[in-house]
Amino acid sequence: MRIESDFLVIGSGIAGLSFALQAANHGSVAIVTKRDISESATKYAQGGIASVFSAEDSFDAHVEDTLVAGAGICHEDVVRMVVEEGPQTIRNLIEWGVKFTTSGADYDLTREGGHSARRILHAEDITGREIERALVEAVRQHPDIQVYENHIAIDLITAAKLEKKTLPENRCLGAYTLDINGGNVITFSSTVTLLASGGAGKVYLYTCNPDVASGDGVAMAYRAGATIANMEFMQFHPTTLFHPLAKSFLISEAVRGEGAILRRRDGTPFMEKYHKLKDLAPRDIVARAIDNEMKTSGDDCVYLDITHEPPDFVRSRFPNIYQTCMEFDLDMTKQWLPVVPAAHYLCGGVAVNQNAETDIPGLYTIGEAAFTGLHGGNRLASNSLLEAAVYAGRAFQHSSNALKFLKRDQRKIPAWDSGTATNSDEMVVVSQNWDEIRRTMWNYVGIVRSDKRLARAMRRIKLIQDEIEEYYWNFNVTSDLIELRNISTVAELIVSCAQMRKESRGLHYTIDYPERDDANGKQDSYIKKQF
């Protein structure tokens, strides 16, 4: 089966849906999403979206906060562009139906770690859910957008792959996609292909990401020949609820923004010895501090205390967090919340320019799957939704203009060929390798690293990849197998980039090079598949 469109969008979070709504006014759009359209990391974003929306704030201040958090390797021109285009991007979201929380006649702006002013627009403490709701409703109503749920992209289709040689003018032609329910592979042919497939938190054993975050876009782009960058910078969210029945429930940074204090089990606050901003320090510092406190004390967690704030304020400001914690018999107005760090956000990804173009013509990447240069070595809180929405607009502007001069490639794309592959009777291989990769990454490539740990991780990942490749070519593809193949690729990329960086900077901390090296370490870590 073959489906043709002007624009193919892979992913259905704020990035993909924002792009689709704009692109649909200039051509046909097909959205491929591997679960329900609403299931994305966007849906689980609690805190909000950062933008200058107050007379007490300024573009310069937002830029400076982003540069400081980014540990010296943000691309300043990108930071300024994103910050300055932020307010109009927010207005676009409002026009699509997003309802941010107001205070009187103005929007209620809150503050999070690393920000020097209140500039976080939010919808109570379920901002992502509200953004996703509005965008999904708008997409559902647009006649020129077709949504293919429960479809997982397997690989990008490129001219070079079809010709089986390196072409001077390679180009992305679409993607092969598995219909998960039907079990058949569909060819999606497009003039413009947009990767908006999200992050890769599932590469780690403990993550606050949804199950869909298996790094699919990064892995596919790498296999197709696109340049990947800065994969060593995986952000660990400092405060994920530590409870045997809670599936990595995130406690928003906004809780600390409203005065919560991190404490040891004995009640001692500890952040003042790690940073002058104490509990409002950037995430990398807070995560490392918690990791160190846990290793020093031997405790399984630390505690987040907001019991000194009025109970009514806590319940009204954080209704979703409060209610979820109550389901686990934790009343945050009276009890400290047990928290631990967990893999949260990938600051690296597919390298793109300011128009979201990759180095494969016809292929664009936005959102968490992209490396734009905005986040540097550490993402400033609530800049991710902003980046995704801003780059959705820029990708739309550039690709829709390009569409005027491009015709859909008439090269015959062959249907997916399963060859002699059969249905597997050894799915234990998939589950075993999945678990081993994630444990290896957590133990050896986590918050604190070393040369020996990275080398051990790479050896194990390479061995697992050999098993996966043999399995992949012998058996029919399934969604579990596709995701396993992708997390193994992303794990390799994270370790490779981490081995390149001989310093500690931002989210990458190694005991072998504990200091930041501004003389030699300011460059980004680029990696490209050799064919």
Image: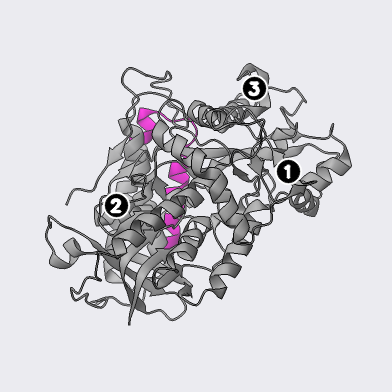
Q: Which residue is drawn at 50% across and 44% down?
A: 85
- Residue type marked 2: Tyr
**In the displayed structure image, the side of residue 58 where residue 78 appears, left or right:** left
Q: Give the range drawn in magenta.
A: 427-455
Circles 1 and 3: CB atoms closer than 8 Å: no
Depth check, front residue: 183 or 84: 84
Q: Can you tell which of label 1 and label 2 is closer to the viewer?
A: 1
- Residue type marked 1: Asp
**Residue on which the image places disc 3:** 277
**In the displayed structure image, the side of residue 408 where residue 65 appears, left or right:** right
For residue 257, above or below residue 166 = above
Q: Residues within 10 Å of mark 2 (few under 14, many from 20)?
A: many
**Residue on which the image places disc 1:** 108
The disc, 1 or 3, on the residue closer to the chain's N-terminal end is: 1
Q: Decide whether residue 191 is among the magenta residues.
A: no
For label 2, the SS is helix
Marks 3 and 2 sit apart, C-alpha to C-alpha, by: 39 Å
Q: Which residue is drawn at 56% across and 63% down?
A: 39
Q: In which quarter of the image is residue 441?
A: top left
Quadrant including the N terminus = bottom left
Q: Can you tell which of label 3 and label 2 is closer to the viewer?
A: 3
**In the displayed structure image, the side of residue 403 where residue 109 appears, left or right:** right
